[in-house]
Image (cartoon, helix red, strand yellow):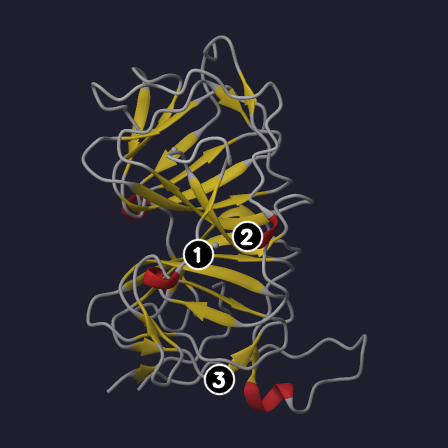
Amino acid sequence: MQKIIALSALTILVAGCPAKDAPVESAVPAEAEAAAPAEAEAPAPASVATAAADIQWALFNPEQPDGPQLSPIAGNMKEGAFTALVKLPAGHASPLHTHPASFIGVGLTGTIQNGRSAEDNSTITVGTTWTEPANEVHFTGCTEEAECTFVAYMDGAIGMTAAEAAAEGEMAMTVMAAADLAWEPINPEAPDGPQMVVVGGDKATGPFQALVQFPGGAASPPHSHKASYGGAVVSGTMGDGGDVTYGAGSTWTHIADEVHVTACVSEEPCLFFASMDGAFSMVPAEAAEEAPAEGAEAAPAEAAPAE
């Protein structure tokens, strides 16, 4: 039986050493649009969950059929901030490049490496979070053992510009394993309940990005948020309180004000990445039905004892 945990607050959102014989892509267009084709644009606002096996992928660069692929989750990558899944072929190695927007990523599968060059980089595995500031020259790749996938958030439109030389001096990129993050209980009165850590933005004003960890079997009460968000499962098996479940690599979105349940249906803890497009809020389902007049501030939800 799932244990129900009421939360007074909840924040529910991403390239490795090349194979020895795998050729490194020799060039990137001087100012690559790198936008997915029209059929892969972010979906219209709607709440939806997509299992990992059903993810629809589109080429990052149509001229590289064996190159990286993308699958939008939320936002419009051609116009502004967005969240997406990214897949790199095993042995992939990008040339040195920059992006015009800042980046936050979390590893989902495979062994990603990101850093100064193909010879000087950090290893990124499942659950590892890394950031890359806008316009910093870097290398991204995937080791030859298996393809790599990760969830990514960019705070502006997608783009990629080739660089001729590696970054000099200390790099501003960061890399942190999930176990080394500063986790805090979402509900201070339930220290053994769900935990989260904000990895980008400000949840008080929004938008923001966070990693969230639910204990195995834990579920939130029915609630809604005043902002929309997109998420991706890093590990464990998530659910919606009903028959729908989705494992690692699956994605989902919730539009603002839609009542839902977030649950971890596996015995092991669930870790997921989420990006909310506004400030954090959590409104219990019963409170949503009696919402205050526009402009009035809703009272915070009271935390009920966990079962």
Q: Is residue 156 left or right of residue 6?
A: right
Q: Verify CB contact (< 8 Å) between mark 3 and mark 2.
A: no
Where residue 36 appears, as percent x and y from the top left, is 55, 44
Q: Please rate how many residues cluster around mark 1, counting C-alpha atoms within 10 Å: few if below 14, some from 14 to 19, many from 20.
A: some
Q: Residue at x 46, y 20 (%)?
A: 171
Residue tagged 3: 222
In percent of the image, x 50 and y 19: which residue is there? 137
Separation (CA) of disc 2 from disc 1: 8 Å
Residue 296 visible within the image: yes
Provide the secondary structure element on which disc 2 rests: helix
Compared across the picture, whether 64 is left or right of 155 comes to left
Q: Are marks 2 and 1 in contact (CB under 8 Å)?
A: yes
- Work out whether residue 231 or residue 294 is closer to the camera in this orientation and state it: 231
Q: Nearer the viewer, residue 45 or 304?
A: 45
Q: CA distance from mark 3 to mark 2?
A: 31 Å
Q: Earlier in the sequence, mark 3 or mark 2?
A: 2
Q: Position of residue 155 (x, y in %)?
A: 61, 42
Precedes in sequence: disc 2 or disc 1: 2
Tell which circle, 1 or 3, labels the residue nearer the N-terminal end: 1
**Whether residue 304 is situated above or below residue 197 in the rendered picture:** below
SS at circle 1: loop
Please, what is the three-letter code of the amino acid marked with disc 1? Gln
Q: Eyeballing the image, is 292 above or below 148?
A: below
**Residue 152: which numbered mark, if any?**
none
Quadrant showing the N terminus: bottom left
- Between 148 and 172, the one lying in front of the other is 148
- Find disc 1 in the rendering and name its residue: 56
Three-letter amino acid code of the residue under disc 3: Pro
**Gap between marks 1 and 3, in whole Å?**
29 Å
Name the side, left or right, on which 285 lies relative to 297: left
Q: Which residue is mark 2?
A: 40
Question: What amino acid is at disc 2?
Answer: Ala
